[in-house]
Amino acid sequence: MRNLLADTTPLKVSADYRRLWFGLSISNIGTQVTIVAVGLQVYALTGSTLAVGVLGLFSLVPLVALGLYGGALVDHYDRRKVSLVSSAVLWLVVAAIAAQAWLDVESVELLYGLVAVQSAAFAINNPARSAIIPRLLPKELMPAANALASLSMNVALTGGPLVGALLVAQLGYAWAYTLDMVLFLAALWAVFRLPPVLPEGVDGGAGNGRSRVGGAVGLRSVLDGLRYLATQPNVRTTFLVDICAMVLSFPRVLWPAAGVIYLGGGETTTGVLAAAFAVGGIVASVFSGGLTRMRKQGQIIVWAITAWGLSIAAFGLVLVLVGRGSPDGAIMWAVVAAGIALAFAGGSDSISSVFRQSILQTATPDHMRGRLQGVFIVVVAGGPRLGEMVLGAEATWFGEGWAAVAGGLTCVVLLWVIVRLTPRFWRYDARHPEP
């Protein structure tokens, strides 16, 4: 049984990693609290669902625009300093969000601006943190470390929104944001305690911040990273298969209609579906011990995304079988069946994410790691947003159920086409990581 449970060896062998994991796990809960509270505050100020949706735009654009440049910064300067400065900016933004709530400013425009600045800082902070971890642990422990990261994130995604909604309902927005300020200090402390993490090739003595693969940070450095990615089939395929899964079959946009028109129960059922997805990720992470010790990581990713696509198709099939009846109450067997399908999807996505990140962190040379982490954050942020647009359009044409069925099956077919075109990825062996 011990071999099935999540491998906690990374927490035992590195005190720096242990502090970083606990700090980020605590701060992630606060981040989710703020995400929910900001959405609720914007809706309270405007009464418009569209205005809440615009928050996503203000979050996505800076993330995509600065993700690549943030990765270039990480490859040129001390990653601890980059992470510490960007983390401090993130904390100051949360403090500003809390201040506007305490002062009853009631400005939607101000909230939009603060969310944009927060997203820009995250676009630099995330590649820095991700590029630091491979320097704290041996490469064979990276799958276990990423499984632990997936576990903490899914716990935050499950509990954070609930805590945020309860705080807003009982105490108000200001207390929710203030809680995030306090919890984020754990991440700041963990990063502060890290040793310097200079990228390989940076001349720390000269202090000029230049690396062996480029000059000062700029467009050329970003393009060098993209050109490198184009020549490395294994790392490139990790991005392609994730885009395949997220763009063709990311189901979140279908959940509200599923709760109201198909399964019954309205917002409660929508919440159950979202929770089922997150719980699936938690279960997969908790019982990841055996998987993280396997070396055929390309094959694991392929089978995980295959399971993802089939799970989304199964979710859609439940909706097709129930039909668009707008029931007064929840149809329990259908809610349970849809929840199980989404739990399998969430678990499959978690497994895929663990090994895609592991390949990226171990096969990529250190001097390119930040830039490819920047690409990673752009793909991870942009893929689901594009997926919501694709499935939303398909739902308008064919209905939500058939959109999920078609999206899931198309994902599986295209995935295997990609694998057939890149046989090296199928043969990828973690004992001999090749980009």
Image (cartoon, rainbow, N blue to C red):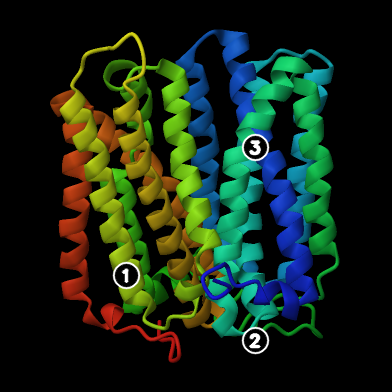
Query: Residue lying furthest front in this view?
Result: 1
Q: In this view of the protein, can residue 230 be seen by the observer?
A: no
Label 1, label 2: how many angstroms apart (C-alpha)? 27 Å
Query: For the residue carrying disc 3, how many other residues have a C-alpha within 10 Å: few (<14), some (14-19), or many (20+)?
Result: many
Horizontal and vertical percent position of residue 107: 68, 15
User: Label 2 neighbourhood size at 10 Å, few (<14), some (14-19), many (20+)?
Assistant: some
In the displayed image of the protein, which residue is found farthest to the bottom? 432
Q: Which quarter of the rendered picture does the N terminus lie within?
A: bottom right
Residue 372 percent across, percent down from the top left: 49, 68
Percent of width and height locating residue 214: 56, 78
Amino acid on which disc 1 is placed: Thr
Asked where in the image residue 147 lies, by quadrant, the reply is bottom right
Q: Which residue is mark 3?
A: 160
Q: Residue at x 27, y 12 (%)?
A: 326
- In this rendering, the answer to whether 107 lies above or below 138 is above
Q: Nearer the viewer, mark 3 or mark 1?
A: 3
Lateral position of residue 257 relative to residue 203, left or right:
left
Q: Which mark is residue 237?
A: 1
Q: What residue is disc 2 on?
A: 201
